[in-house]
Image (spheres, rainbow, N blue to C red):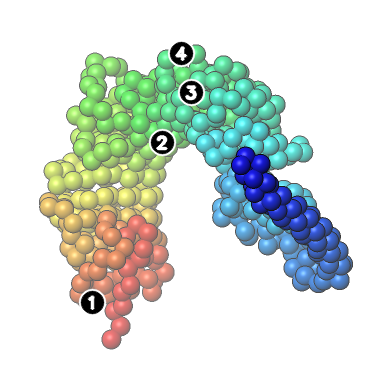
Amino acid sequence: MMSLVSSASATPTASLRTHLNDIAQMIEQQKQLLAQMESYETQIRHELDRVAFYPVLSLPAEIVTEIFIHCLPDPEHINANVNEAPLLLMAVCKQWARIALSVPALWRSLELDGREWEDQELLDVMELWFRGNATRKAALRGEIFPTVLARFMQSFGAKANRITELTLAFGEETLLEFKEIPFQMSQLTELAVYGFASAGQSLAINAPLLRRASFFSISPASLSIQWSQLTDVTCGNYSFDHFFEALNLLPNLIRFDVTMASDGEHRDQTRGTLTHLNLRHLRLVQDSDSRPQLPMLHFLALPHLESLETDEADEVFLGAFLIRSAGPHLETLRFLANSTTSSKLLITILRTLNGLVSFDMRYPSTKLVSKFFRRFSADTKMLPNLRSLQVGCRDKSGEISLVGLTSILGPAVIERNKRAKQKATQRIDTLRLVVSAAAWSTYTIPKSDLQPYQELKDDGVDVYLGTKDHPFEWDVSG
């Protein structure tokens, strides 16, 4: 009985094994056929490459170079991104890669986000951009993965002497590593650093050519640089104390652009006056709409100041600052008025600024506009050297409207320019009426109010009516 069962089961087993063997042979035959077809495909491709004609590959290298340069989304800020030129061009074919590598304009700057690259790829990008001996601009952002950070720092240090402009916007961990190494940057002329903590050792950069710098949310103590060399500095989100700390470190500063933090900190009114003898251009603004009780101008004396923009000081502090600075020869003033601005006091102050060439007054009241331009059109001693005038308005209670401003500004400038023809004062060459509104906003202004602006244009005055970025369409014909 047992032998019968064994004999019965042996037959299907042998049959299955035979069938598997047949399948294996068929697979082997198909593999051989596939290999033959792949070999044949390779031969055909080689023949196609030999006889085919691709017009784009026949273009002179000079033409291809110009095309490649126009492929850059932003020639001044070139991203290390595989979906953009130049890396995208490198992936098309070997000929394009060779041409791309030979075009310096494709590699003159590097925008690198450490979060987009891992380990060896990050190092390869650095080597690709910095091959040869040419100088580069570099902007480094994000975080560098810890597994490659030490090697990246070594690579960056080796190339630091060839960087002319540097932006550091790394995360905290990466920035801390940058503090560990002093960098020699003999070609660096411009530096921007974002988000440094004030504690611990400072970032040390030896850059004998450094002249321009930007610092955002940074304590000056966090930077060990040649402060006395700097002539042009921009600071963002700066505190009361950091403002004075920076200004004391910058004896040769000529241009200072500062946005003060609106953190509600107390400004010590007992702090003495800081006098800076070299500062010529100051932009001092708040990062909020509210004015502090004590503006920074209250603590400054700038006897050689030529241009001033401020939105944190009213006319009282402005007048006191000008007196304290012994009458600086201001040529440019951009002043934020409001519904409480004293017309009489501001007009008195402006009448002392005989050297003013450009004046920008934003958001004045109807009362201030009426009194100022009535005086401006008739009094030749009111800003006698003014050539450029800009007035801004917005739809806010207590401030003059666009329609109201339009009806007053144009006629006043026409009267002023009539007096200029009599050599009694300078002529207004540039007139801008700028409204803070959406680009698609529409306004209805009587043609009679627009006619003076057309007359001014016909007389050669550069007239602009519109928002900051978009001019209005207006027509007085018909």
Q: In the figure, 111 relative to 23: above or below? A: above
Q: Amino acid at mark 1?
A: Lys
Q: Earlier in the sequence, mark 3 or mark 4?
A: 3
- The residue labelled by disc 3 is 173
- The residue labelled by disc 4 is 200
Give the number of the disc on residue 447: 1
In space, the residues marked 1 and 2 are separated at their CA atoms by 41 Å
Q: Residues within 10 Å of mark 1 (few under 14, many from 20)?
A: few
- Residue name at image x 70 percent, y 26 percent: 158
Camera-nearest label, 4 or 1: 4
Discs 4, 2 touching: Cβ within 8 Å:
no
In the picture, residue 118 is in which quadrant? top right
Q: Earlier in the sequence, mark 1 or mark 3?
A: 3
Q: Residues within 10 Å of mark 4 (few under 14, many from 20)?
A: few
Residue 392: horizontal and vertical position, in percent? Answer: 27, 54
In space, the residues marked 4 and 2 are separated at their CA atoms by 27 Å
Helix, strand or loop at disc 3? helix
- The residue labelled by disc 2 is 257
